[in-house]
Image (spheres, rainbow, N blue to C red):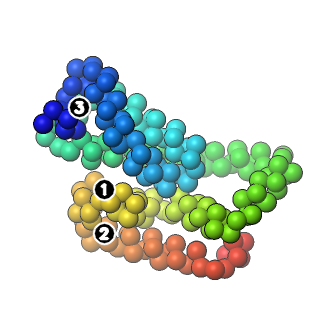
Amino acid sequence: MKDSDEALAALARTGDRQAFEVLVRRYKEPLYRFCRRYVGNADDASDVLQDAFVAAWMGLQRYDERRSFAAWLQRITLNKCRDFGRRGLVRRLFLTRFEREQPAEAASAQAAATADPNTERLARLEREVAALPPAYKEALLLTTFSGKSHLDAAKQLGISVKAVEMRIYRAKQRLAGLMSDKPIHGR
């Protein structure tokens, strides 16, 4: 099939940028949603996704056409999200220091974010998902939000289906406890 992912990837391997652009358009939205949930911030998610597509373009020669292109691209995206998470500590330290230097602006942003309780609850959920331990977050995002089966998630993560199920269970338990109707600062 000419428009299959694998056929387009084969064309892209020869330097056909238009074929790769078709693949980017095909996967941009679902991968963006995955990144958004993983990193917890729209701007960062866009940056991570861009890094993933650049890495995919640069790594097309390593793509094994006998395997699913979608799974290969998802794996690259997951790795870029993990890389982002590893760099997150330095970024959080910098932002915390910056916010201490800009207290009026931080208070104004906080007031705007809490104007709508549903918006705040959704933002809180996104923060909590982004803050989950990587093992829990990855299993949850791959299955619940990306629609992969437990078997596909297990293959992608290199773990058993039972381990995927346990990680999802633990992630949901943790989120349920964190997202109860307690006040945000009352943890």
Q: Secondary structure at mark 1?
A: helix
The image position of residue 76, as x and y in percent, is: 35, 42
Image quadrant assignment for residue 67: top left
N-terminal label among 3 and 2: 3
Disc 1 vs disc 2: Cβ atoms closer than 8 Å?
A: yes
Residue 87 is at least partly visible in this image: no
Residue at the location (40% across, 60% down)? 145
Q: Can you identify the residue that label 3 sits on?
A: 9
Q: Can you identify the residue that label 2 sits on?
A: 163
Residue 42 against residue 21 in the figure, above or below: below
Of marks 3 and 2, the one in the foreground: 3
Q: Can you identify the residue that label 1 sits on?
A: 157
Question: Whole-Å distance between the Cαs marked 3 and 2?
Answer: 32 Å
Residue at the location (56% across, 43% down)? 44
- Kind of residue indicated by mark 2: Ala
Q: Secondary structure at mark 2?
A: helix
Image quadrant assignment for residue 167: bottom left
Question: In the drawing, does residue 116 fall left or right of residue 36?
Answer: right
Of marks 3 and 1, the one in the foreground: 3
Considering the image in quadrants, where does the C terminus appear? bottom right
Residue 38 is at least partly visible in this image: yes
